[in-house]
Structures are given as structure tokens and as C-alpha cells.
């Protein structure tokens, strides 16, 4: 069989699309397979619909604050179905844009699933075969399900975006990104929210900021049950009930969200038969250049189990395509300096190392600066909560290893600081930069 393509990509989510576009830019003949809508999790079940809901939650709070500061308006509930339709229209337009751009780029799009039958051969759902010297697995991940009684009574994050009305009483199991974000959003819309956490909130973030976030969430009325161990869910006369081995009986609830992590879409890809190694959870094992255990087969994005973020999948795919088809030297992704924001209420962002990781690596050479303050817009509206910012530095030069921000604006503020940190930012660079005033971001320049 002669090669039909130079590159075949399985999955048209963030990672697959980025790889396909970049490879086509370099002149490669690219085949892109996906049986589902273009854009994958991020566009249809992740970042985009989530951020739309988060904006709506911000507007719900802005209504309250506007009324407090003297606007003659009566804060009202969100017309959930109207907003869902607006959101869907926005998402449909993204899907259409991708289809048009793929055509313009000369990428052959096949709306089918594929699986490996040899190191250079993909079999499609209809039994036809494609061949290419380079294959990229970008099949993403899906919500984890738990094998416990009554699990189907609850929803996973995908289902949250199809909800037709706001649940009055909601339980959320988990303490990662999805749990924290939905807890904040549902509470902002007026739901009663119980958050049942097995581990600490947002375990990848600096503990000092997650403790501050947890306190603010509790002050907003979110009931947090720590060290939870949910064993079963069942339906009672007035809603869903949970059996928690530590917290006891919980509920009743109108809605239950299992936010207990994600598992890779790798089991139907024929990986074992061609020798592609996976870890015990099914993530495709890759080296720093996205290469799997089989020459010519690569993987990017959530299926690899590395940081499961859209820009990471995109960056990995682009670098891989540059290396394979652009003749560019290897530039492995620096996983230490990936900025990330949890769209909690308020948002929590970080780039670089937490204080704990910095101390593990550098011991007493670490210096920490922090600042707590009430943002002006909150103070005006009578809110007492404080923003918390933290710089983690190392050595006599005080190179900045980590920047952490909890508070309004964190989600926009951190991107520029992430550039500086990547370029080797030192504390004195912040000291000598002229601030923008009045702003929250200037506090990062005024520490110490
Ligand atoms: C609720 C939620 C909110 C999130 N919010 C954010 C956020 O704010 N910021 C952020 O950076 N990240 C966020 N993420 C994470 C982000 O969505 C993922 O990291 C990103 O979508 C991963 O991209 P991917 O290309 O690896 O996989 P995906 O986007 O999942 O794409 C995989 C694609 O592969 C296809 N596929 C599967 N099997 C096959 C097959 N055999 N053949 C062909 N195609 C196949 C699927 O149909 C899918 O379209 C969020 C995730 C969730 C769940
Ligand atoms: N803002 C963002 O960038 C954003 C938002 C959402 C998701 N994401 C990405 O998607 C990934 C998945 O998010 P997630 O929140 O589903 O996963 P996560 O890995 O962030 O958190 C999983 C949570 O599930 C809990 N858990 C696991 N098994 C459990 C059990 N049996 N009982 C109770 N709790 C259990 C863990 O304690 C943890 O709190 C994230 O890691 C992140 O990379 C990013």
C-alpha cells in the first residue's frame, strides 16, 4: 500500500487540530479523523461552554454589586435556556470556522473514528485504510465514572452543559478544577451547593491561596465537606441522597455532579497490538518530544496524561509538527512554567512553582513575598474579601519561580507575567517596572 498521507491525526480536538494545521502549513499531506464535532472537549464540553457560564456567573454577581452601589435594578435570575441557546450559537460558529479553515489549509477531514492496525496504517470505521509514515494520537479524555451504587443518578461535566434549568440544591463530588468551577458558578446563580472533597481543593495550586479560596467559597455559602468518602447515591422522596462514610448521610439534592477526574480515550485504538505503551490508566506514554514507544507514532494532549489543558495540547502539537515537517530543532515543552487559571469565584491563577515545590527543590534559598488587599471594586460594593498575591523567588538574584494570584482579574493578569517569568524574570525587574494605577496587577510590582 502506498502512503495516502504524510501525517494522519486521530482526533480533531485542541491537540489534533493544532498538529494538523501546523503540519499542513509546512506542506505535509494531512488526514484528520474525528467522528464528532470539530474542536473536541474544549469547544463542546470544556473551556468554551464553561467560560460562557462563568461570564454569566460574573454578570449575576455584577448585578448584585451594581444594585449595592446605587443602580436602580432588581437582580434577577438567568433565563437558563435563552443563555444556553446563545452559547450554542457561539460554539456552532467555532465548529463551522474550523471546517472552513481545514479546507483552506488542504487538510483532508474524515468524519470517522480510526484505529491502528500497523505502525503506519489506520483503519477507519467503514473498514477502509489510510497509510502514513507519521501518526499522531490526539483522542483526548472523558469524565471518569465510579463503580459505586447509584452513580448513574448523578451527572458528569459533559451533562452540565445540557442542563435545562438551574438545580436548586446541588451536590458536587470532587475538589479539582471542574468541582471548584461549577461550585462557584452554581452558587453565583443562586443554587445551594454542597462540595464533597476527598482531597484538598485544587491540589496543584499553592496551598496558601487554595485555603484563602476555600474560605471565600464558604463565606459565599458553599458548604464544604472535607475528607469526604461518598460510597453510594440513591433516590429519596425529596431528591438524591448520598451515603458518605465520613460525613454521614447528605442531601436531598436536585442534582449531583461527579467531578472525579478524567480517563484517556485510548482503549479502542489498537495500541497494544502495534506495541504502543500506555500507563496503568491508559495514557499513551511519550517522551519530551511527544514520541511514543513506537517510531512514527506520537501523542499529544489529554491522552498523554500530561497537564490536561488546551494550550498545552496545542503547543505540543505545533512543536511536534514543526519538528516532523518544518525542519525545526527540538524544543521540548517546559511543563514547569505553564500558566493555569481555575475559573473559581474568585479566579485563582498560577504560573511556575508553588512555594512547597520551590522549597523541595531549593530549600532555604527560597524567598516569598505576599500581598493581601481588598480590590477597589469590591470595597466600593461593600465586599470584605481580599485578593491574595504571592511571589516565590530563589537565590540572591531573586529569580521568580512562581507567581500566584487569587482575586478578580487573575484570569487576564497572569498571561503577561507568565511571559516575563519564562524569560527569566527577577524580583528587581518587577521593582523597576512602572505600575499601572489604580489596578490590582500593580500589587505584584509593589511587594517587599
Ligand atoms: C469542564 C471542562 C472545562 C475545561 N476548562 C478548561 C479551561 O478553562 N482551560 C483549559 O486550558 N483547559 C480546560 N479544560 C481542558 C481541555 O478541554 C482539554 O485539555 C483539551 O480539550 C484537550 O484537548 P485534546 O486535543 O487532547 O482532546 P479533546 O479535545 O478531548 O479531543 C479529542 C478528540 O478525539 C476524538 N476521538 C476520540 N477517539 C477517536 C478515534 N478513535 N478516532 C478519531 N478521533 C477520535 C474525539 O471525538 C475528540 O473530538 C477543560 C476540560 C473540561 C472537561
Ligand atoms: N480552568 C481550567 O483550566 C480547567 C477547568 C476544568 C478542567 N481542566 C482540566 O481538566 C482536568 C480534569 O478536571 P477534573 O476536575 O475532572 O479533574 P482533577 O484531576 O482536577 O480533579 C479530580 C478530583 O477528583 C477527586 N476524586 C478522584 N476520585 C475520587 C473519588 N473516588 N471520590 C471522590 N473524589 C475523587 C480528586 O480528589 C480530585 O479532586 C483538570 O486536571 C484540568 O487539567 C482545566
Image (cartoon, rainbow, N blue to C red):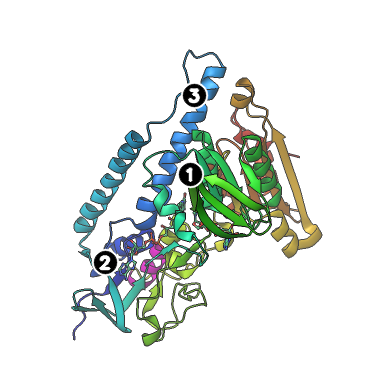
Q: Based on the displayed image, in which of its 4 quarters is residue 409 positioned?
A: top right
Near-viewer residue (340 or 235): 235
The overriding secondary structure of the stretch rendered in magenta is helix
Q: Which mark is residue 254?
A: 1
Where does the image place residue 309, in percent across and percent down from the top left?
47, 57
Q: Residues within 10 Å of mark 1 (few under 14, many from 20)?
A: some
The magenta stretch spans residue 322: yes
Element under label 3?
helix
Residue 337 is drawn in which quadrant?
A: bottom right
- Residue 402 is inside the magenta segment: no
The residue under label 2 is 32
Residue 57, percent from left and from top? 48, 35
User: Which type of secondary structure does the marked residue at label 2 adopt?
Assistant: strand
Tally of numbered tags: 3
Q: Is residue 423 visible?
A: no
Q: Which residue is mark 3?
A: 63
- Expressed as whole percent of the image width and height from the top left, the position of residue 326 reads 34, 68
Start-end of magenta stretch: 317-325
Amino acid at each position: 500500500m502506498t502512503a495516502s498521507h504524510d501525517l494522519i491525526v486521530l482526533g480533531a480536538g485542541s491537540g489534533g487540530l493544532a498538529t494538523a494545521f501546523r503540519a499542513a502549513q509546512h506542506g505535509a499531506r494531512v488526514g484528520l479523523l474525528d467522528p464528532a464535532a470539530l474542536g473536541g472537549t474544549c469547544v463542546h464540553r470544556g473551556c468554551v461552554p464553561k467560560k460562557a457560564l462563568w461570564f454569566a456567573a460574573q454578570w449575576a454577581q455584577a448585578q448584585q454589586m451594581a444594585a449595592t452601589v446605587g443602580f436602580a435594578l432588581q437582580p434577577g435570575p438567568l433565563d437558563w435556556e435563552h443563555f444556553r441557546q446563545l452559547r450554542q450559537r457561539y460554539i456552532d460558529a467555532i465548529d463551522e470556522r474550523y471546517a472552513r479553515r481545514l479546507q483552506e489549509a488542504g487538510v483532508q477531514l474524515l468524519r470517522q473514528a480510526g484505529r491502528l492496525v500497523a505502525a503506519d496504517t489506520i483503519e477507519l470505521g467503514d473498514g477502509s485504510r489510510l497509510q502514513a509514515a507519521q501518526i499522531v494520537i490526539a483522542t483526548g479524555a472523558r469524565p471518569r465514572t465510579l463503580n459505586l451504587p447509584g452513580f448513574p443518578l448523578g451527572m458528569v461535566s459533559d451533562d452540565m452543559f445540557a442542563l435545562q434549568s438551574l438545580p436548586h440544591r446541588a451536590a458536587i463530588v470532587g475538589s479539582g478544577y471542574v468541582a471548584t468551577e461549577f461550585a462557584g458558578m452554581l452558587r453565583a446563580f443562586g443554587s445551594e451547593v454542597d462540595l464533597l472533597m476527598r482531597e484538598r481543593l485544587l491540589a496543584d495550586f499553592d496551598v496558601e491561596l487554595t485555603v484563602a479560596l476555600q474560605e471565600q467559597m464558604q463565606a459565599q455559602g458553599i458548604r464544604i465537606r472535607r475528607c469526604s468518602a461518598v460510597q453510594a447515591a440513591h433516590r429519596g422522596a425529596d431528591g438524591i441522597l448520598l451515603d458518605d462514610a465520613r460525613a454521614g448521610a447528605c442531601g436531598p439534592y436536585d442534582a449531583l455532579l461527579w467531578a472525579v477526574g478524567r480517563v484517556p480515550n485510548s482503549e479502542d485504538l489498537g495500541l497494544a497490538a502495534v506495541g504502543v505503551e500506555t500507563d496503568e490508566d491508559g495514557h499513551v506514554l511519550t517522551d519530551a518530544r511527544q514520541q511514543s514507544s513506537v517510531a512514527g507514532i506520537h501523542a499529544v494532549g489529554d491522552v498523554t496524561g500530561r497537564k490536561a489543558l488546551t494550550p498545552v495540547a496545542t503547543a505540543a502539537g505545533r512543536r511536534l509538527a514543526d519538528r516532523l515537517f518544518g525542519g525545526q530543532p527540538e524544543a521540548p515543552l517546559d511543563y514547569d512554567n505553564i500558566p493555569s487559571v481555575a475559573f473559581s469565584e474568585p479566579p485563582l491563577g498560577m504560573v511556575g512553582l508553588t512555594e512547597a515545590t520551590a522549597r523541595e527543590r531549593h530549600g532555604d534559598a527560597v524567598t516569598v513575598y505576599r500581598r493581601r488587599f481588598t480590590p477597589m471594586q469590591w470595597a466600593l460594593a461593600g465586599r470584605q474579601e481580599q485578593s491574595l498575591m504571592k511571589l516565590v523567588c530563589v537565590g540572591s538574584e531573586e529569580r521568580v519561580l512562581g507567581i500566584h494570584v487569587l482575586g478578580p482579574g487573575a484570569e487576564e493578569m497572569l498571561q503577561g507575567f507568565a511571559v516575563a517569568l519564562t524569560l527569566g524574570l527577577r524580583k528587581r525587574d518587577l521593582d523597576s517596572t512602572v505600575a499601572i494605577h489604580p489596578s490590582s496587577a500593580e500589587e505584584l510590582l509593589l511587594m517587599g
